[in-house]
Image (cartoon, rainbow, N blue to C red):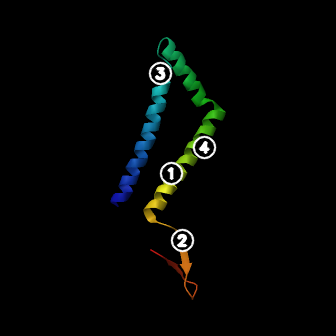
């Protein structure tokens, strides 16, 4: 049960970081002068439909590959051999 709670907290922290960063960029759009111009430009790029969907797709794909690679390193190779009766046997 402890590992499940740890995984939930990691996921919550990632989502919280994402929304805080997005809120920081949105707040930068209200700054005066050049920094406000840069903030508005970044906000427009982030929220444009094509760029937002494409960037979220590539971010999710990268996270998927990273999590899968981490899991495979932790659990070991997925190679399975069959014995003479056809029962799968994992070599460790």
Q: Which residue is mark 2?
A: 79
| Secondary element at image label 3 | helix
Which residue has dot 3 on it? 28
Q: Which mark is residue 66?
A: 1
Callout 1 secondary element: helix
Decide: is 58 above or below 74: above
Q: Residue furthest bottom?
A: 85
Circle 2 packing at 10 Å, graded few (<14), some (14-19), many (20+), is few
Question: Earlier along the polypeptide chain: callout 4 or callout 1?
Answer: 4
Q: Left or right of 56: which side holds 25? A: left
What is the distance, in whole Å, between disc 2 and disc 3 at their CAs? 51 Å
Q: Earlier in the sequence, mark 4 or mark 2?
A: 4
Q: CA distance from mark 2 to mark 1?
A: 20 Å
Q: Which mark is residue 39?
A: none
Give the mark, 3 or 4, whose residue is nearer the N terminus.
3
Q: Earlier in the sequence, mark 3 or mark 1?
A: 3
């Amino acid at each position: 049960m402890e590992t499940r709670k740890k995984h939930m907290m990691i996921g919550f922290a990632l989502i919280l970081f994402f929304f805080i960063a997005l809120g920081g960029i949105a707040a930068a759009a209200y700054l005066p002068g050049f920094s406000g111009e840069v903030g508005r430009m970044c906000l427009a790029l982030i929220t444009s439909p094509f760029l937002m969907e494409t960037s979220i797709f590539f971010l999710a794909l990268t996270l998927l590959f990273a999590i899968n690679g981490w899991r495979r390193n932790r659990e070991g190779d997925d190679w399975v051999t069959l014995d003479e009766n056809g029962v799968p046997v994992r070599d460790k």
